Amino acid sequence: MTPTEPSLRELIAAPHPDRASLPPAAPGVRELRGVPYGEVEGSRPLELDLWLPETDQAARPVPLVLFVHGGAWHRGRRDDMGLRTRHWAPSPFAHIAAAGFAVACADYRLSGEATFPAPLDDLRAALRWLTLRSAELGIDTERTVVWGESAGGHLASLLALTHTDPSPSPASRGYPMPAGAVVWYAPSDLTTARGCFTPEDAATPEARMLGSAPATVPERARAASPLAHVRSSAPPFLLIHGDEDTLVDRSHSQSLATALEQAGAPVDLLKVTGADHGWHRLPDAHIEEIFTRSLAFVRRLLP
């Protein structure tokens, strides 16, 4: 019998810890793994991984990239930038650190553990903790870019856009506004049917994240939609999306870019021809170009 080809969702899922490759060491980079950053009543401890460039302790603190992993808000691992970068040695995070930036990859509660706004509150708490401990770590969170892919890109967008929004959570206070956002193939609107997503469906990843079909909780769906939080004071965005994405329709990035432009906020939109979700089936060289362009955007914002 011919073996069944894995689905795209199966391909982009992070490998099981029993089979995942160990990260190779990178020259000039210091790694801190499994650093606790938050405690939530009745939940697991929240942790983050840090990649820090080896610098003189007396030197100027280094800027920060806060990376947010994907996985449909339901699965995933904090140190995974997606399907097509898992074989990189050194890892993409070591590459970013070698360029002179600190990188933090943070846990957030998944949809099987808690519903929105829990994952966003967790990322706010992570950035608050990084700010609190910045002197010890040698980082400058006043110079932070958030970078996320897929569901992580959605949360990164919200983190960048909702800094000034009223929030009942103390985690939303005590951290500076991000200086920018790099967003790969992420949802921006949970209120409107797009591609394979319909807000009436209670079985979608979006519904699991919200705790109900988006159409039945319209205010919560709007609160979880980056598109609804666009403002003229938004930080610069780099949006990159494949034009053949079968999981998150490219219109999500197009609509967010248009809204940011109309609000007068800086935004760059890159459409990747022939790319499915997770850069599936895209040549390796093209993925390296996307990563290089993303890192160049970070360099420009974080001198």
Image: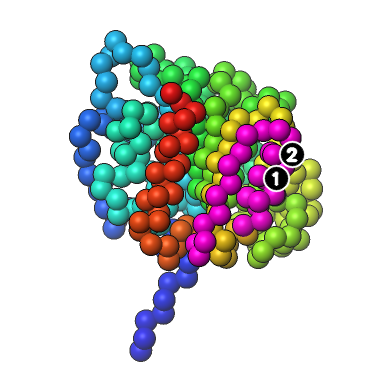
Along the horizontal axis of the image, is 262 left or right of 158? right
In which quadrant will I find the C terminus?
A: top left
**262 left or right, relative to 73:** right
Identify the disc placed on residue 262.
Answer: 2
Q: Is residue 257 magenta?
A: yes
Q: Is residue 206 above or below residue 135?
A: below
**Residue at left 59%, top 33%?**
236
Quadrant of res 268: top right
Looking at the image, what colour scheme do you see?
A: rainbow
Per the image, the residue denoted by label 1 is 258
Residue 95 x %, y %: 31, 39
Quadrant in the rendering for residue 181? top right
Residue 285 horizontal/vertical position (percent): 35, 56
Looking at the rendered structure, which numbered label has been put on residue 55? Answer: none
Q: Are marks 1 and 2 in contact (CB under 8 Å)?
A: yes
Residue at 58% x, 46% y: name it: 269
Could you tell me which secondary element the residue under label 2 belongs to?
Answer: helix
Residue at image position (54%, 27%) is: 179
In the rendered structure, which segment of residues is drawn in magenta? 250-276
| In this picture, residue 115 sits left or right of residue 281 | right
Residue 22, given in percent of the width and then of the height, sits at 25, 48
Q: Nearer the viewer, residue 199 or 94?
A: 94
Quadrant location, the N terminus: bottom left
